[in-house]
Image (spheres, grey):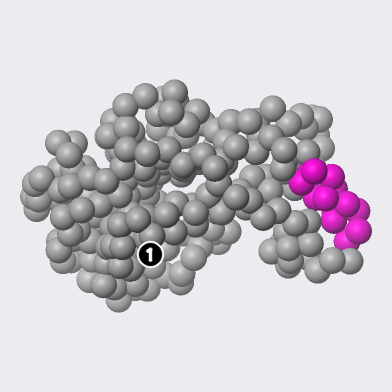
């Protein structure tokens, strides 16, 4: 088990504006993003927690990883030819929760949310690159509890149990409804794959700002009947 805390950040108001498809002509928005980046940069401490784990049992409806049972036919199918996996928890950091936003200032809250999301994305990329460099697993895919109804968010405690005291390690805790606090955190399992698997291809939710691939009805049918 390892915690990655020295995660480089590339925060720029201009690129954030581009990611919002707003161009760079909205000067007030660009100025606010620039101001918030100056506040965020010195205090941001994103973290990534991961471990190398092994599958010790496969059943028709799930898998056991290092003695912890996970119930998901899709996860089971994705891990059919896999023995080694990389469970992880990544967070933009609890430090960012201390940045004040006046009640009703929706624009400032939105801009801060955009910055936190960018930090989380960069921390996730950093973790994947670290795993690739250190373990050379080949092409990686991932699944996240709650991203599909076939692997519900109620599986979060099982995933967290692989790490012990997650809050002490990276400052992330689970709420009673299995959500993560701070909210700009994500958990999942990285695994080697020979296919281009993305949970989005099996999800019909629309619209979704986090969609990374179009819904693929043929793949969805194949996975649910397989």
At horizontal 25% and vertical 52% (from top left) the residue drawn is 85
Majority secondary structure of magenta residues: helix
At horizontal 44% and vertical 23% (from top left) the residue drawn is 168
On the picture, is 197 further left or further right than 48? left
Closer to the camera in the image, 197 or 165: 165
What range of the chain is rendered magenta? 26-38
- Residue for badge 1: 198
Closer to the camera in the image, 62 or 68: 68
The answer to if 152 sits in the magenta stretch is no
Location of residue 139 by image quarter: bottom left
At horizontal 49% and vertical 65% (from top left) the residue drawn is 212
Location of residue 2 by image quarter: top left
Residue 226, image x and y in percent?
A: 16, 66
At horizontal 29% and vertical 73% (from top left) the residue drawn is 195
Above/below status of 69 relative to 172 = below
Above/below status of 10 relative to 102 = below
Residue 61, image x and y in percent?
A: 14, 50
Q: Can residue 149 be spotted in the picture? A: no
């Amino acid at each position: 088990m390892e915690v990655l805390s020295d995660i480089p950040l590339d925060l720029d108001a201009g690129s954030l504006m581009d990611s919002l498809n707003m161009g760079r002509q909205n000067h007030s928005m660009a100025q606010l993003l620039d101001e918030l980046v100056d506040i965020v940069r010195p205090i941001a401490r994103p973290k990534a927690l991961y471990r190398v784990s092994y599958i010790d049992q496969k059943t028709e409806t799930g898998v056991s990883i290092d003695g912890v049972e996970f119930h998901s036919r899709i996860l089971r199918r994705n891990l059919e030819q896999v023995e080694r996996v990389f469970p992880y928890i990544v967070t933009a950091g609890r430090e960012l929760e201390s940045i004040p936003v006046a009640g009703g200032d929706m624009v400032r809250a939105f801009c801060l949310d955009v910055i936190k999301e960018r930090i989380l994305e960069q921390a996730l990329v950093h973790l994947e690159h670290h795993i690739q460099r250190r373990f050379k697993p080949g092409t990686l895919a991932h699944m996240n509890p709650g991203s599909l109804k076939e692997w519900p968010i109620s599986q979060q405690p099982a995933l967290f149990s692989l790490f012990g005291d997650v809050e002490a390690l990276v400052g992330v805790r689970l709420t009673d409804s299995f959500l993560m606090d701070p909210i700009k955190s994500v958990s999942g399992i990285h695994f080697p794959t020979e296919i281009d698997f993305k949970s989005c291809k099996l999800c019909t939710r629309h619209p979704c700002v986090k969609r990374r691939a179009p819904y693929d009805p043929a793949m969805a049918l194949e996975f649910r009947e397989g």
